[in-house]
Image (cartoon, rainbow, N blue to C red):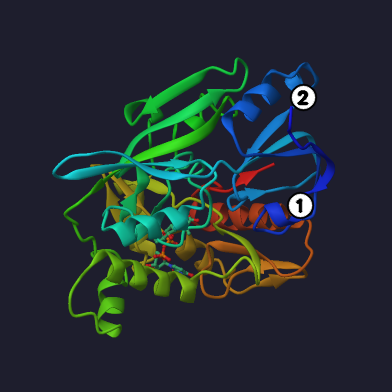
Amino acid sequence: MGIHIQKNFSLKSFNTFGIDVKARYLVQVTGVQDLYELLMDEAFKTIPKLMLGSGSNILFTRNFPGLVLQMAIEGIEKVKEDDRYVWIKAGAGVNWHTLVVYCIDHGYAGIENLSLIPGTVGAAPMQNIGAYGVEIKEVFEALEALEISTGALKVFDQAACTFGYRDSIFKNTLKGKYIVLSVTLRLQKQPLFRTEYGAIKATLEAMHVKELSIKAISDAIIRIRQCKLPDPKQMGNAGSFFKNPEINTTNFERLQAVYPTIPGYKHGQAKVKIPAAWLIEQCGWKGQRRDKVGVHDRQALILVNYKKAKGTEIKQLALDIQASVAHKFDIELVPEVHII
Ligand code: EPU
């Protein structure tokens, strides 16, 4: 087979934290047939496997002793349309923002609020990516995946993915069992503008936008993200390190009595979502630097690798942050980033 297997391969440029660990084997997957052959190859059947998109939500704390499959299946195509919707299928290796730009250029609405999220199309449903009031699950139609143990092809519809907040079945019961090959989204021909979240409206005004469009919203979101979120090319990071915790309303009211300024967003009937960034900032971590690692000075939910840190140093910082938030607020922070 024409598969190029690289040995003892440095993953430094394959993770946005820029951690220099090695994979025993690395293969860039550009087609389904190659992937199938590789999975069925006796030499690789029993060793651990790790699927990697662009490595923007992962923290390596050690060398990977098995086979890293770097997803590079490309392609964007229209598969169906009716009066209201258009169905777009994209290869799992397509850069997420490239797909967003494609949709905006063609006038297909629904993912403009998800502009500039790092990562690949295949990784997007894994953690149900979301930003600025929108999650991928709202436009998700289906995905195709290969079962690692059998090589069988399976289609998962929206219900089968059991999406939650930064969560899906692929982070739970099916963790490590499937490799996503493509994702199909159902986008609207008539846009439904979503500008309620945070600074979108103010940014659109500051940009003197007269007529709302999906392009204008995308531009506003890009501007917001660029001023808050550090560029991994300049400073290693993986976006939000922790999920925003959800607590029950009674606990929230108890905290509010002690900390009147605590922000909270109602989530369902009895739950309140609290920004983890606020909790971390209150514990004094924002902008703190500890040798090669630190907490970003403009967004306390982002941990950064200033230079050549080890994954274990970032992990230790995360553990210390978790401990102080637990101590001060009695709230458990759960990492959003996949720690290996
Ligand atoms: N805040 C602070 N201190 C800070 C930053 C924020 O107190 O340093 C508080 C403020 O009250 C602010 C609130 O936190 O209003 C929310 O902050 P922000 O809008 O920056 O969003 P976030 O909750 O920190 C989430 C997602 C981001 C997504 C943004 C925008 C999670 C874990 N993170 O962050 O997603 O871009 O909302 O929708 O849900 C990611 O998942 O990697 C990611 C970047």
Say whether residue 214 is left or right of residue 170: left
Q: Amino acid at mark 1?
A: Thr
Q: Which mark is residue 312?
A: 1
Q: Residue furthest left?
A: 83
User: 119 left or right of 47?
Assistant: left
In the image, farthest residue toward the right: 8
CA neighbours of label 1 inside 10 A, class few (<14), some (14 to 19), many (20+): some
Q: Is residue 207 above or below residue 226?
A: below
Along the viewing direction, whichever of 132 and 186 lies nearer the viewer: 186
Q: Earlier in the sequence, mark 1 or mark 2?
A: 2
- The C terminus: image quadrant: top right
User: Which residue lies at the image location 60% right of the left edge and 15% below the top edge?
Assistant: 150
In the image, 21 versus 109, the foreground residue is 109
Label 2: element kind: loop
Neighbours of disc 2 within 10 Å: few (<14), some (14-19), many (20+):
few
The answer to whether residue 81 is above or below residue 300 is above
Q: Quadrant of residue 28?
A: top right
Instruction: Provide the residue designation for mark 2.
Output: 47
Q: Secondary structure at mark 1?
A: helix
Give the quarter of the figure containing the N terminus: top right
Q: Position of residue 125 (x, y in %)?
A: 44, 40
Say which quarter of the image contains residue 5.
top right
Q: Are marks 1 and 2 in contact (CB under 8 Å)?
A: no
Q: Is residue 115 visible?
A: yes
Work out how far the residue at label 1 is from the one at label 2, CA to CA, in angstroms: 24 Å
Q: Residue at x 67, y 53 (%)?
A: 15
Pinpoint residue 164: horizontal percent, then vertical percent: 38, 38
Query: Measured from the top left, where is residue 201 in percent x and y?
Result: 25, 73
Image position of 190 (left or right of 178) = left
Quarter for ligand 1? bottom left
Residue 171 in view here: no
